[in-house]
Image (cartoon, helix red, strand yellow):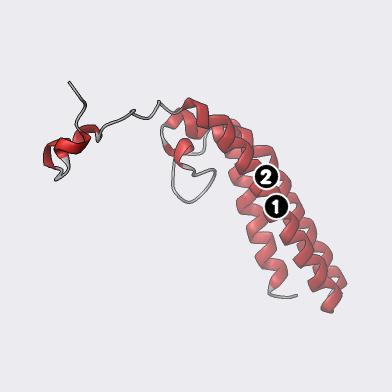
């Protein structure tokens, strides 16, 4: 537990800081922290909205990780490790639920996908005549 508890404390700090920054709208768009789905990464506004939505679950997961590390450290041994493991699993599901809700919320904000044809790639495509729009 001497190794597991500090690891949970560090992960808790990352989750809480990410959640607070997301809630305040101050989390910069990046590929490492926060909600990083395609819809969220499409624009700064989408990223900010997604991370504001996911922020409460991120803070909650951080609190779970911290509590799991604390109880695990106090209990020690196999029981402490079990508590830490359960807390970590619940925290992962909590983060996932928040990210899922955020991704669903910003998905409608994406511009509509082009319909039909090959888009702008028809000029160099070997199937240019096949997928070109009919006149």
Which quadrant of the figure has residue 3?
Answer: bottom right
Q: Secondary structure at mark 1?
A: helix
Which quadrant of the figure has residue 21?
Answer: top right
Q: Secondary structure at mark 2?
A: helix
Q: Residues within 10 Å of mark 1 (few under 14, many from 20)?
A: few
- Where residue 89 sits in the image (x, y, percent)? 72, 60
Instruction: Compute the Cα span from label 2 to label 1.
Output: 6 Å
**Location of residue 45 with respect to 35 vertically, above or below:** above
**Location of residue 42 with respect to 79 vertically, above or below:** above
Q: Residue furthest bottom?
A: 77
Which quadrant of the figure has residue 22?
Answer: top right
Residue 93: assigned label: 1
**Location of residue 92 with respect to 22 vertically, above or below:** below
Residue 104: assigned label: none
Question: The C terminus is located in which quarter?
Answer: top left
Q: Residue furthest top?
A: 135
Q: Residues within 10 Å of mark 2 (few under 14, many from 20)?
A: some
The answer to whether mark 2 and mark 1 are in CB contact below 8 A is yes
Residue at 69% across / 63% down in the picture?
A: 8
Residue at 40% across / 26% down in the picture?
A: 112
- Where residue 2 sits in the image (x, y, percent)? 73, 75
Residue at 75% across / 75% down in the picture?
A: 1
Q: Is residue 57 left or right of residue 116?
A: right
Residue at 52% across / 48% down in the picture?
A: 33
Q: Nearer the viewer, residue 95 or 75?
A: 95
- Where residue 98 sits in the image (x, y, percent)? 65, 41
Residue 97: assigned label: 2
- Where residue 107 sits in the image (x, y, percent)? 51, 32
**Location of residue 5 with respect to 58 vertically, above or below:** below
């Amino acid at each position: 537990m001497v190794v597991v508890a500090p690891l949970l404390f560090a992960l808790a700090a990352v989750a809480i800081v990410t959640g607070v920054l997301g809630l305040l709208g101050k989390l910069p768009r990046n590929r490492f922290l926060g909600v990083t789905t395609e819809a969220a990464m499409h624009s700064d506004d989408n990223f900010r909205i997604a991370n504001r939505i996911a922020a409460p679950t991120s803070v909650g997961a951080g609190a779970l990780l911290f509590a799991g590390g604390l109880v695990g450290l106090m209990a020690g041994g196999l029981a402490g490790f079990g508590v830490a493991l359960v807390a970590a699993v619940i925290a992962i599901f909590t983060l996932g639920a928040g990210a899922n809700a955020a991704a669903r919320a910003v998905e409608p904000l994406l511009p509509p996908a082009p319909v039909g044809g090959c888009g702008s790639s028809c000029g160099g495509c070997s199937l240019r005549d096949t997928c070109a729009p009919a006149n």
